[in-house]
């Protein structure tokens, strides 16, 4: 179960990273144009990566 949760969290982190990339002209997505989004968005991605990796490793070690 931990492996599925970890894989899902890493997938969500990957999707969030892909969504937050600027377009070809360098424009940020609309939800990243606000100051609060620039403060909250990177820690959210890092928490998904960290918790997803921890759950994935935990699932691998308990098998």
Image: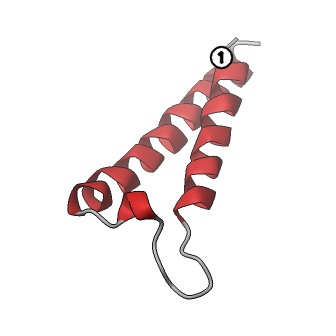
Work out whether 5 lies above or below 14: above
Q: In the image, what residue occupies the spot 62% across and 22% down?
A: 58
Tell me residue 30's x, y (percent): 42, 63
Dot 1: few (<14), some (14–19), or many (≥20) neighbours within 10 Å? Answer: some
Is residue 60 shown above or below 30? above
> Residue 35 at what x, y percent from top left?
22, 63
> Which quadrant of the figure contains the C terminus?
top right
Q: Badge 1 is on which residue?
A: 2
Count how many numbered circles sit on residues in the image: 1
Outermost residue toward the right in this view = 63
Q: Look at the numbered disc 1 and give the secondary structure of its residue.
A: helix
Q: Is residue 43 left or right of residue 7?
A: left
Indicate the quadrant where residue 3 lies. Answer: top right
Q: Is residue 7 above or below residue 46?
A: above
Q: Residue furthest bottom?
A: 25
* Picture coordinates of residue 61, whole percent (x, y): 69, 21
Q: 20 and 11: which one is in front?
A: 20
Residue at (45% x, 72% y) in the render: 28
In the picture as drawn, the residue positioned furthest to the front comes out as 30
Quadrant in the rendering for residue 25:
bottom right
Q: Assign the N terminus to one quadrant of the image.
A: top right
Q: How is the image coloured?
A: secondary structure
Would you identify the image quadrant in which residue 44 lies?
top left
Q: Residue at x 57, y 33 (%)?
A: 52
Judge whether 56 appears above or below 20 on screen.
Answer: above
Please state if 8 lies on the left or on the right of 53 as rendered. right
């Amino acid at each position: 179960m931990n492996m599925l949760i970890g894989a899902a969290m890493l997938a969500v982190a990957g999707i969030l990273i892909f969504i937050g990339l600027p377009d070809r002209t360098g424009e940020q997505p609309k939800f990243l144009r606000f100051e609060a989004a620039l403060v909250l968005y990177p820690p959210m991605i890092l928490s998904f990566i960290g918790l997803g990796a921890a759950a994935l490793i935990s699932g691998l070690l308990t098998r």
